[in-house]
Amino acid sequence: MTDLWRNDVLLRDEAPVIVIGAGLAGLTAARRLHDAGTSVVVLEAASVVGGRTLTSSAGWSGSQYANFGGELIDSSYRALRALCDELSVELAAPQVYSRVAEGDLSPMEGYLRVARFVVDGHLLDRQEAARAGDELRAAARATPPAHHEIVEQWIRRARLSTITAGVVRALARFFTQLDPWDCDVHFVFGAHSGSFQRIHGGTQQLAFALAAGLDVRCGKQVVRALRGGTVRVVTADGEEFEGSRLVCAVGPFVVNNIGFDPPLSEAKVMATTSMLPAMAGKVMAQYAEGDLVRSAFGSLVCTDGDIDVAWVSVTEQDGSPAIVTSFFAGAGRGPMADPGTALAQLDDLVEQAVGHRVDRLHSDIKDWWADPLQLGVTIAPPENARSQISAVVSAVEHKTHFVGDYTDAPMAGTLEGAVRSGLRAAEEILRQQPTYHTDFITERLSRAWAQ
């Protein structure tokens, strides 16, 4: 047995797996590896764990909170729900945003029965919403959308009325946080759940539970990743970490800010640069007239303006204030650069929904597109290319495993996709069982007995 062979075995057995990114994907992978007895070090560029699951909890009256990032959980999120059960993370009661009926040809019809819509500044009444649903159904029969067709292309080909076109654009942006000329029709014609749950206390509670007991180093932005016989990463402050394997758990555009040596494969670079980020953020405000606001926002309020959707996500006691969360996305994201403008637009929408003036108590804004550590809300490859792109970006190369919601084809762009990708990477690593020489095993046993 040579010293070189012995050193390699010792490294594989003792050197930690290094995880870049303490979002949901990275922490899920790290937790699974840790629970299986593998040493793990998690490096997070931000000052706190959570990635895009951050929760806003400071400054709100009555100890209320709101989610900066992902929050909607439907019945198909099996891996995430299992993780919550395992870690005793509580899910809040479901909120219903859609009601499906026999004969529906798209999920949009179900949303028109429950949600409220503002099109061209006008708040639709129930009769107008019903007529839009009828028009959608007739258009889907007369002009079936091609499975690869862009939403805006279908709107124009189907010659939808102004109101119905505004509804489709509003829902397309709600489902994707992309403009209707940037997403294909499967987002508005594919299966959607109309009932959602959220994590009690905010989505970041799951990140905190996953991180408990792990070796997580916050404020450590990785700028270089050297992958030879071993793995070595260098952070922006010059600190180096050596390990056996690397889990890269950051978004595709952040991946492209890391200097990999050897470089990433051409296919992976092409795939990451071809994806379109959801250029969006959240603007949230708390209003004193809580009961009126909760009544007005019993479901969603979707618009074709700068704000694509708004909701009250947390049910509070009667008489308490209410927090309205809104999304500014795509071409409408500009107002977030001026918080006063963005909040004034949210105030106007709330007052339109409520029917009279409201008093804002507190507010918060998170522009994910402008965050250099995220560079977008989420990324979902086009439906027809999703399997191929996800296969390329998730492929293991040079002891490096890639995770994130964009690497999971079936659930790309979701919290569930992030969890699934983390579980997948952990299994990839755990299947790499080292082979030991009998002399090495005897030496280890002797050392253990001596202790």
Image (cartoon, rainbow, N blue to C red):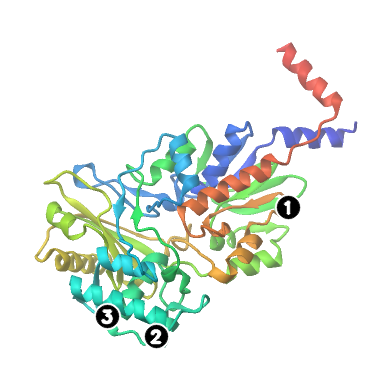
Q: Going by the image, does 241 lie left or right of 301? A: right
Q: Residue furthest top?
A: 450
The residue indicated by pointer 3 is 163
Decide which of 125, 5 is in the foreground and name it.
Answer: 125
Q: Is mark 1 on a helix, strand or loop?
A: loop
Residue 41, percent from left and from top: 59, 39
Count neighbours of disc 3 (C-alpha within 10 A) and say few if under 14, some if 14 to 19, many if 20 or more. Answer: many
Count neighbours of disc 2 (C-alpha within 10 A) and say few if under 14, some if 14 to 19, many if 20 or more. Answer: some
Q: Give the mark toward the camera: 2 or 3.
A: 2
Residue 16, percent from left and from top: 65, 37
Q: Is residue 291 above or below residue 378?
A: above
Q: Residue furthest front?
A: 102
Point 54% across, 54% down: residue: 404
Point 52% across, 41% down: residue: 217
Q: Are marks 1 and 3 in contact (CB under 8 Å)?
A: no
Q: Give the mark toward the camera: 1 or 3.
A: 3
* Label number found at residue 398: 1
User: Nearer the N terminus, badge 2 or badge 3?
Assistant: 2
Residue type at the position of mark 1: His
Q: Is residue 81 above or below residue 377?
A: above
User: How far apart, in angstroms, are the residues tagged by discs 1 and 3?
Assistant: 53 Å
The residue indicated by pointer 2 is 158
Q: Can residue 329 be seen in this view?
A: no
Residue 359, percent from left and from top: 12, 58
User: How far apart, in angstroms, are the residues tagged by discs 2 and 3?
Assistant: 13 Å
Q: Which residue lies furthest to the right in this view?
A: 1
Count of marks placed on residues: 3
Residue 124, percent from left and from top: 20, 74
